[in-house]
Amino acid sequence: MANRTLLKSGGDNATIVVYARTTTALPAYTYANGTAGVGATMTANANGAFPTIDGQTLVANDATKGLFLQNNGAAFADNGVYMLTTQGSAGAAWVATRLGGADTAATIPLKAVRVAVGVEYAGAEFRYCNNPTITMGTTALAGLRSDPRRTPNDWVEWLTDFDQQVAAPATSATMPGPFGGIFSIGAGAAISVASSSATKFGVFTLSTGTATASGATVSLVAASGRPLFWQTEMYIEGDFIFTGPNALSDGTNTYRTMVGVAATTGVAATDGVWIEYTQATDTHWLAVCRASSSSTTQAGPTVTINQTYRWRWVKYAGETSVHFYCDGTEVGTGVAGAPTGASLTPNITIIKSAGGTARTFDIDYYKIGVGYPNRRAA
């Protein structure tokens, strides 16, 4: 039965074709995890036929019309590909069983799922996006839409590589992001375009300037795109490339730099997720989650002047911790304390708190991506 559902006989990496995909939560059910996911079932809590999903009527144990993608589970750990094994009736509860070959920690991340029919999702394809370390029955499972017809209801991102800037920006100028959003340069900011070289093109240099409490901020213009409204069900990732700083913060010239998302621009944010360096706190880069003015941090590598770093962080759908990576190596095992329900926008900042010598760092690439595994297609 399982082999007949595969688009091609590609073994573990094959694409599974299901008949339909859930668009809303199923009626109340009880999930049983089987043996580490093998034989796992969802059994309705009340008698009755299995409901139509995305306008389609499923047929129990039918190799074509019995398969469906559950992506709106009562718990994220319930999600995945199922075969309807008991139709359900006035005298019996419906039962759905995880599909063999897509029911273990080893196989789930390898499968793409294509939806055959449906009012909303006909032709849609989904790929696993969540934590690669899976414990069946516990780890949140989710797939993001990956086909060309996906919309901003499925995936949206703010990205700029700064390459379109060929002259130093004016104070309070705006900088169009090529893939959505307009980035604004804060009033009084000391920002310039770094001289082009074999390793630098379209790189912004942010400076504290020489005055105390001065600095530079690049943020997203709120009117140019929706802010990130941080929610547990979202998949959220950030990707940043920057070089610096040009000198360490010390007792004479003290400053703070941040790259990420925050409720407000600058360094006084009450909520957000970012990478930070401030000598007053630590000599390392810090991975920071902040909610209601309370921060949880994880120390990363020691700050090295004039070094180029690539930082990435990921908040998996259904999870609350954020996983930070510096140059491909995870910093810790997930930082708790991310804000929930907070409205956040991109924030790139360097601000001086003491001293009269300018300190700088270069920002080369900035991206925030947000996926909605449970969002309707239109």
Image: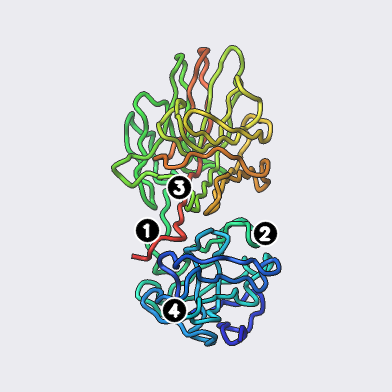
Look at label 1 and name its amino acid.
Pro
The quarter of the picture where the C terminus appears is bottom left
- Alpha carbon distance from label 2 to label 3: 23 Å
Residue 31: which quarter of the image? bottom right
Please state which amino acid type lies under the numbered disc 3: Gln
Residue underneath mark 3: 231
Q: Secondary structure at mark 1?
A: loop
Is tag 1's residue or tag 2's residue first in the polypeptide sequence? 2
Say whether residue 255 is left or right of residue 188: right
Distance from the alpha carbon under mark 1 to that under mark 3: 16 Å
Answer above or below: position of 35 versus 300: below
- Amino acid beneath label 4: Ala
- Residue tagged 2: 135
Check disc 2 and give the amino acid type.
Answer: Thr
Q: How is the image coloured?
A: rainbow
Horizontal and vertical percent for residue 366? 48, 44
Residue 130 on image: x %, y %: 57, 57
- Discs 1/3, front: 3
What secondary structure is marked by label 2? loop
**Numbered mark located on residue 49 in the image:** 4
Residue at which label 1 appears: 152
Q: Nearer the viewer, mark 2 or mark 4?
A: 4
